Image (tube, helix red, strand yellow):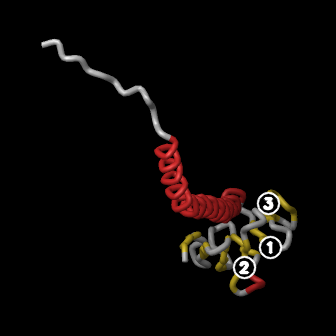
Amino acid sequence: MGQRVEIDERGFTLLELLVTLLVLAVVLSLAGPTIGRSVEGVRTRAEVARFAAMLRHTREQAITTRRPHSLLVDPPGHRVMIMSDDEVRETRALPEHLAVEAEPPPALTVRFEPYGVSNGGTFWLTAGAIRYRVTVDPLTGRVRTERL
């Protein structure tokens, strides 16, 4: 009846600690680049969403004020401007890592009319290996984004 249980109080050996740290280092070295890429992807997706939202906002401003509004993209200056009557209404900086191109190249300005139509356009937004296409339908003014 009176069995005695002995507890081993030696702790961990130095070898066991080194093996554990080695395993952790290998796991982190494998997972680190994947986490970095996913953070870059989320950041780029958020910037593309902001760009598309600014296009939609420009269209809404044209409709609600009943005056034409334009969105002008300035790639070298890394900024986007909303203009009405040749006056800058809003300006937003684009991140340095985000490159913006238009198709055709002079289409860096999209003009929205008071009844919702636009001159249309296609923008290519690139950050590293991540590339998106943002299109503005000329007939409806609808803005769509697509990851390529």
Please, what is the three-letter code of the amino acid marked with disc 2? Glu
Q: Which of the pair 30/6 is nearer the observer?
A: 6
Residue 61 lies, with reference to residue 13, above or below; the image says: below
The residue to which callout 3 is attached is 93
Q: Secondary structure at mark 3?
A: strand
Q: Secondary structure at mark 1?
A: loop
Q: Which of the pair 41/54 is nearer the observer?
A: 41
Residue furthest out toward the top: 2
Q: Secondary structure at mark 2?
A: strand
Q: Which of the pair 61/17 is nearer the observer?
A: 17
User: x and y percent of residue 129 in the render?
Assistant: 62, 75
User: x and y percent of residue 14 in the render?
Assistant: 52, 42
Left or right side of 26 for 118: right
For marks 2 and 3 on the same chain, the one whose residue lies earlier in the sequence: 3
The residue to which callout 1 is attached is 75
Please, what is the three-letter code of the amino acid marked with disc 1? Pro
Q: Residue at x 69, y 84 (%)?
A: 103
Asked if residue 100 shows in the view, the reply is yes
Q: Residue at x 64, y 79 (%)?
A: 122
Proximity of marks 1 and 2: CB atoms separated by less than 8 Å: yes
The span from disc 3 to disc 1 (Cα, nearest Å) is: 10 Å
Number of numbered discs on residues = 3
Q: Which quarter of the picture shows residue 118?
A: bottom right
